[in-house]
Image (tube, grey):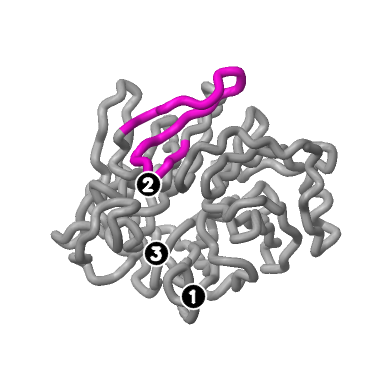
């Protein structure tokens, strides 16, 4: 169908859309689609289907296939500066990297001698440092991992510096930290708190932090409170706008926190990523399905 399902809350949003583009449904065979990552070298999209314990792939003209199964209940994914897949694994409670030869390298599995909860989402900065969130979604039931008690006792945000193996704590005052994304110049880090998924009185907002040269986070403040559902995965575009998942679709916020508009999706959205050969195609994982639509802006380049 022709893509017309959007809400314009600010005239600036019209310039971020392609009103003659089509919203495409690439597949609808998932239980909870998450963690999309795009590889420009091969025009390939990979994502997680967490409860089915598998990762799927899609490429133009090739359709959908299984990339990895079992996947240790993988959730968030990204690619590093060398084009390698970096994944959060709920089941194994770790962050891993898939090398070009297919072998696996464990990046993080413990903090302060204790097992991580269930790493959820991950990004890599321009220097190669790996940042990830560690809520407890993968250990509170057997649906997206294996039920277990948290050894750490908190849900934190961590960083692994390039060339290091030490997992460093960067933020410990989230209830359920989830998606995260840098501003285009990496001076700011946006982190979602999706705790309202299990408690109506808990946070349902995105916070933003100033990033110091040593990787420390300063001046944390609430960027936006979600109007629909909870924030999950998020990305920024080259203009600094923040695109985030929500219950009713994808919400787009200006750098000043103003809601610009929404792309309405008929399923609860979990995550999204910019891709395509020009970084102007938005891939959206939403409950059982994966959607794609061309937009009028490019995703932020790392």
**Residue at image point 57% right, 34% down:** 27
Mark toward the start of the polypeptide (1 vs 2): 2
**Residue at image point 44% right, 37% down:** 79
Which residue is labeled 3 in the image?
Answer: 216
Which residue is labeled 1 in the image?
Answer: 203
Q: Nearer the viewer, mark 3 or mark 1?
A: 1
**Separation of residues labelled 1 and 2 (CA atoms):** 25 Å
Residue 50 on the magenta span: yes
Give the vertical position of 242 relative to 275 (above or below).
Answer: below
Which residues make up the magenta segment?
47-69
**Separation of residues labelled 3 and 2 (CA atoms):** 34 Å
Which residue is more in the foreground, 46 or 301? 46
Q: Is residue 34 in view?
A: no
Q: Residues within 10 Å of mark 2 (few under 14, many from 20)?
A: some
Q: Quadrant of residue 215?
A: bottom left
| Image coordinates for residue 135, horizontal then vertical, percent | 35, 62
Q: Residues within 10 Å of mark 3 (few under 14, many from 20)?
A: some
Mark toward the start of the polypeptide (3 vs 2): 2
**Residue at image point 57% right, 66% down:** 229
């Amino acid at each position: 169908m022709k893509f017309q399902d959007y809400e314009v809350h600010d005239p600036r949003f019209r310039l971020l859309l392609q009103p003659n583009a089509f919203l495409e449904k690439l597949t609808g065979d998932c239980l909870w689609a998450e963690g999309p990552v795009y590889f420009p070298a091969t025009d390939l999209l990979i994502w997680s289907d967490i409860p089915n314990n598998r990762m799927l792939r899609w490429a133009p003209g090739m359709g959908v296939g299984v990339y990895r199964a079992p996947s240790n209940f993988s959730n968030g994914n990204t690619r590093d500066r060398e084009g390698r897949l970096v994944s959060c694994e709920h089941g194994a409670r770790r962050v891993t990297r898939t090398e070009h030869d297919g072998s696996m390298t464990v990046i993080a599995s413990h903090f302060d001698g204790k097992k991580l909860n269930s790493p959820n989402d991950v990004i890599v900065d321009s220097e190669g440092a790996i940042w990830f969130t560690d809520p407890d979604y993968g250990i509170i039931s057997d649906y997206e991992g294996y039920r277990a008690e948290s050894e750490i006792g908190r849900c934190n945000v961590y960083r692994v510096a390039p060339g290091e193996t030490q997992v460093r704590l960067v933020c410990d005052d989230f209830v359920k930290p989830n998606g995260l994304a840098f501003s285009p110049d990496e001076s700011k880090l946006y982190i979602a708190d999706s705790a309202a998924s299990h408690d109506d009185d808990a946070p349902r907002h995105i916070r933003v932090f100033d990033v110091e040269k040593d990787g420390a986070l300063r001046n944390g403040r609430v960027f936006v409170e979600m109007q629909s559902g909870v924030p999950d995965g998020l990305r920024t575009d080259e203009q600094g706008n923040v695109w985030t998942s929500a219950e009713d679709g994808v919400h787009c916020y200006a750098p000043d926190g103003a809601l610009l508009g929404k792309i309405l999706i008929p399923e609860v959205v979990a995550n999204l990523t910019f891709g395509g050969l020009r970084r102007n195609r938005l891939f959206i994982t939403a409950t059982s399905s994966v959607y794609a639509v061309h937009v009028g802006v490019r995703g932020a380049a790392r």
